Image (cartoon, grey):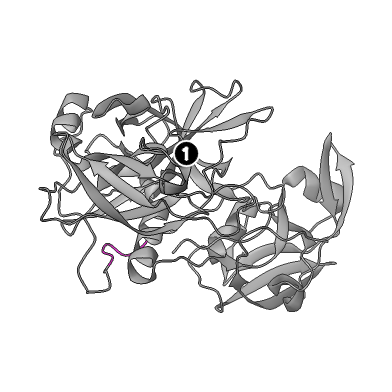
Amino acid sequence: MRPMRPSAVAAIALVSAVIGAVAVLLIGKAAGLIDAETETVLVPTPETSAGPDGASVEPVATPLTGNGFAPARIYAARAKGVVTVYSFYDDRGREEHAAQGSGFVVSEDGTILTSAHVITTAGPGERSPDGADRVYVAFRDGDRVRAQIVGWDVFDDVGVLRVDPDEHALDPVPLGRSSSVVVGEPVAAMGSPFGNEDSLAVGVVSSNRRSIRALTSDYRVIGAIQTDAPITHGNSGGPLFDARGRVIGINAQINSESGESEGVGFAIPIDAARRSLAQLVASGRVAYGYVGVRTEDLTPSLARHFGYGVEHGAIVANVTDDSPGERAGLRGGKDEVYNGQRVTRGGDVIVAIDGRRVRSADDVVRGVAFRLPGQVARFTVLREGRRLNLQVRLGERPAVPETAR
C-alpha cells in the first residue's frame, strides 16, 4: 500500500486540518467538477439511519436546553463523545501513527464519524484510495481501542468507523441540521489539534454553503461551513457544535496562503455527512448522481446583454461527451468576455428542475441533490426563446472528472 501523500500547496494552499453524503451532486460549475466555483445544496435526510442489522445509527443524546452559548457547558456535556483517531499504514515500516485526526461517536453501537482523509490514502487524482491498515481511537480518559473502517466518501470527505461497544463506554453526541445554520451564530470545535487531545475552540459561523477544493478527490466539497473557530492539524474529523451542543459539521480543512495552520477553517455540513453515513453503513459505499454539464449563473445584467427572456437561471456552458446531459439533448454555448469576466452566450438556460424554480447554478445541483444514479430529472430550459422539457437520466459520478467539450 502506498503511503499517504502530503497535501499540495498552491498559490492558495488547502491544508488538511490533520496530517492527512447519499449526497447527490451534479457535474458542472455549480458542483465544481470542471473548474467550478459554486456549490451543491444538501437536502435534509431522514431522522434516522439504519445499519445492515436494522439498528439505528442515530445518536440518542438530546440537545442542551436554553438559548445561550456556554462553551464550558458544551464541553462538559460532549467531550466524552469526542475521540482521537490514529491511522497506521504498515508498509511505512514504522511503529508511530501515520495520520492523526479526530472523530465523534454517533450511536451506541460504536459508530464513529471522522474525515475520509484521516483514515485513507484518498487525494486528488486518486482513483482507488486505500484505507489504513490499522485504526485506533482514544477516548477522553486516554483508553485506546481498535476500530474497524466501515467505509469512506471521498467526494464529501466523510469516513465511518466502528468500535466494539463492549470495549469502552460510549457517549454519543446528537446531530443537528446544517441547513438551519446562519452566519454569525456561535460554534464550538472539538478535537485533538496537534495531538493535544480533548481540546475546545470557539468562534462563529463566518459563512455557509461555501464551495471548497476537496482534500480527497478532484471534485469540490459543496456547502461547506466557514468558521473562524481555529481548525488546525489534528482537528480533522472532529465535531463542530452549535450552541445547543448539536453537531452541525465535521471539521475538515483550512484555506491558507502559507500552507501552515493559520487561515480560514471549513467544516463538512452534517446534512451531507448524514447521507454518507446512511449509505456507508448500509453498503460500504456511496453513489453520486451525474449529469455531465458545467453551468453558470444567469444574472440580470447578463440577461439584458444577451437578450434572454428571464433574469435568473443557470446557463449551460458546456456538456461532456456521451454524458447523461448530452444524451438528454442539453446544449452548451460559446465563451465571451463581458464586464471583465468570461461568460457563456447561447447555451440552454435551465429555469426549473422537476417544476422547482432554478435561479442559479446552485439550484441546478439542488434539483438533483437527493437523487440516485438511474433516476430521471425533468429539466425545463429556455433555448432560443422556446421553453423545452428534457428528461435526464442520471449517471454515476466518475472517480475523476471527465472533460467537457
**How many callouts does the rendering have?**
1
In this view of the protein, can residue 154 be seen by the observer?
yes
* Residue at 33 percent of width and 40 percent of height: 86
* Residue at 58 percent of width and 50 percent of height: 217
Q: How many residues crowd mark 1 within 10 Å: few (<14), some (14–19), many (20+)?
A: many
In the displayed structure, would residue 374 be above or below residue 309? below
Give the image location of residue 278, x and y in percent. Answer: 35, 64
In the displayed structure, would residue 366 be above or below residue 2? below
Q: Is residue 93 left or right of residue 222?
A: left
Give the image location of residue 259, x and y in percent. Answer: 57, 24
In the displayed structure, would residue 400 be above or below residue 373? above
Please tell me whether residue 46 belongs to the stretch shown in magenta: yes
Q: Nearest the camera: 290 or 97? A: 97
Farthest residue toward the front? 93
What residue does disc 1 label? 20
Which quarter of the picture shows residue 188?
Answer: top left
Q: Is residue 239 left or right of residue 117?
A: left
In this view of the protein, can residue 70 be seen by the observer?
no
Predominant SS along the magenta part: loop
Give the image location of residue 57, x and y in percent. Answer: 24, 61
Q: Which residues are magenta?
A: 45-49
Q: Nearest the camera: 32 or 381? A: 32
Give the image location of residue 87, x and y in percent. Answer: 37, 44
* Residue at 38 percent of width and 44 percent of height: 88
Query: Tag 1's secondary structure?
Result: loop
* Residue at 27 percent of width and 69 percent of height: 51
Q: Is residue 296 left or right of residue 97?
A: right
Which image quarter holds the C terminus?
bottom right
Q: Amino acid at mark 1?
A: Gly
Please tell me whether residue 212 belongs to the stretch shown in magenta: no
